[in-house]
């Protein structure tokens, strides 16, 4: 528990950020939460916190937000797989991160935890789990969101090396669980599968983790993480077929689904992107979705377990809690 000053959490109105805020509150942290004007704040229900308005693209608002804080946990990000113009996303995720960490250093913040993503890490190219040491290059990363997270992480590491910013990095895998209000792409997939809206799938590999375990990992990184180090926060490595089988097990409603090759959906993705450019919104499937599906996203959390004492529950619990929340909030039909 901090002796003086609140803990600033950015992105606390979102899925992972709201779980992080709750985990910090349970440890006795006084919370200051950065929220954009007009943001949906339903995920803050029941939290006692000071709310300050600001935006990652407005450095002056970030400087105000960190004033007097002892710790900063930076979770906020523009999280969209597809965008018609990448520049706003890069401004928020990369330059916003750089501005926030510099403001934190200037005001004497004791420690920063930066929420990155396994999207910023390398892959083994097979089903062997990758870790924090697996080689990575930006050229191998698919999609502007993942590239933005890679660039943001590199900016954090550079600030640690060159300006002494006291930052620790965590790399969540694919969080699943309650309060996924947007929802995230993984959450939407689980909701669609549970509702019977997923007659076909492209097989791939993901590491599924409960969002509350990810949140606990943030707190452990704040308490025990080494400055300048990265920690993968995940749980089970599963194929898409296995994930869908767990959804069926939780709903007790086995469904017949067809496995499709990636190339069969390529025309659909192109059409969906064209439609989104003309009509607005985010397409349900994009070419980057399909490129990502061809990569097996298996990871090891051994370093976080050894150094932070991190532990995660089985993926089935995450999927069950997500489905229960989607049902309770009328996102999918109740059982």
Image (spheres, grey):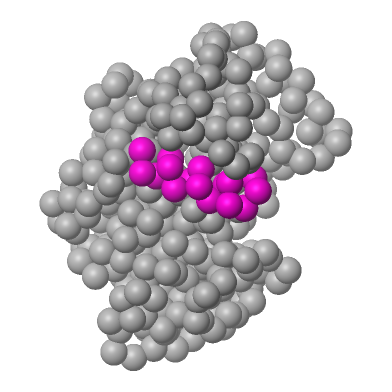
Q: Main secondary structure of the magenta part?
A: helix
Q: Position of residue 243 (x, y in %)?
A: 42, 28
Which quadrant would residue 50 be assigned to in this image? Answer: bottom right
Q: Is residue 256 visible?
A: yes
In front of the other: 259 or 268: 259
| Residue 16 in the image: above or below residue 146 | below
Q: Quadrant of the N terminus?
A: bottom left
Tally the marks.
Answer: 0
Q: Which residues are magenta?
A: 316-331
Residue drawn at 61 percent across, 71 percent down: 35
30 sits to left or right of 299 = right
Q: Position of residue 16 (x, y in %)?
A: 47, 56
Q: From this viewpoint, which residue is outermost toward the left?
A: 306
- Is 318 magenta? The answer is yes
Q: Position of residue 85 (x, y in %)?
A: 72, 42
In front of the other: 77 or 188: 188
Residue drawn at 58 percent across, 16 percent down: 200
Q: Is residue 110 visible?
A: no
Q: Quadrant of the C terminus?
A: top right
52 sits to left or right of 32 = right
Q: Position of residue 260 (x, y in %)?
A: 55, 10
- Is 128 magenta? The answer is no
In front of the other: 191 or 230: 191
| Residue 129 in the image: above or below residue 204 | below
Q: From this viewpoint, which residue is outermost toward the right?
A: 278
| Residue 312 in the image: above or below residue 9 | above
Residue drawn at 77 percent across, 41 percent down: 281
Residue drawn at 71 percent across, 17 percent down: 268
């Amino acid at each position: 528990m901090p002796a003086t000053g609140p803990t600033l959490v950015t992105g606390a109105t979102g899925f992972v950020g709201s779980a992080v805020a709750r985990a910090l509150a349970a440890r006795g942290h006084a919370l200051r939460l950065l929220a954009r004007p007009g943001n949906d704040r339903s995920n803050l229900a029941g939290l006692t916190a000071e709310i300050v308005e600001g935006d990652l693209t407005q450095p002056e608002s970030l400087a105000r937000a960190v004033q007097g804080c002892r710790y900063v946990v930076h979770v906020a990000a523009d999280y969209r797989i597809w965008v018609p113009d990448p520049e706003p996303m890069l401004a928020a995720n990369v330059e916003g991160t750089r501005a926030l960490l510099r403001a934190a250093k200037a005001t004497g913040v004791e420690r920063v935890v930066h929420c990155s993503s396994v999207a910023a890490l390398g892959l083994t190219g097979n089903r062997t789990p990758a870790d924090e040491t697996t080689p990575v290059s930006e050229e191998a990363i698919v999609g502007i969101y993942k590239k933005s997270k890679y660039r943001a992480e590199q900016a954090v590491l550079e600030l640690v090396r060159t300006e002494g910013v006291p930052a620790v990095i965590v790399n969540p895998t694919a969080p699943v669980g309650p309060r996924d209000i947007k929802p995230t792409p993984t959450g939407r997939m689980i909701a669609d599968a549970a509702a019977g809206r997923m007659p076909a799938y492209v097989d791939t590999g993901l590491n599924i983790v409960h969002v509350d375990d990810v949140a606990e990992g943030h707190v452990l990184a704040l308490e025990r993480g080494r400055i300048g180090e990265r920690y993968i926060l995940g749980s089970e490595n599963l194929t898409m077929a296995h994930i869908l089988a767990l959804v069926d097990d939780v709903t007790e409603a086995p469904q017949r689904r067809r496995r499709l090759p990636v190339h069969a959906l390529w025309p659909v993705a192109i059409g969906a992107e064209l439609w989104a450019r003309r009509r607005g919104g985010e397409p349900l499937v994009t070419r980057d979705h399909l490129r990502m599906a061809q990569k097996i996203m298996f990871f090891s959390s051994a370093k976080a377990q050894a150094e932070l004492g991190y532990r995660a529950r089985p993926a089935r619990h995450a999927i069950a809690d997500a489905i229960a929340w989607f049902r309770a909030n009328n996102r999918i039909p109740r059982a």
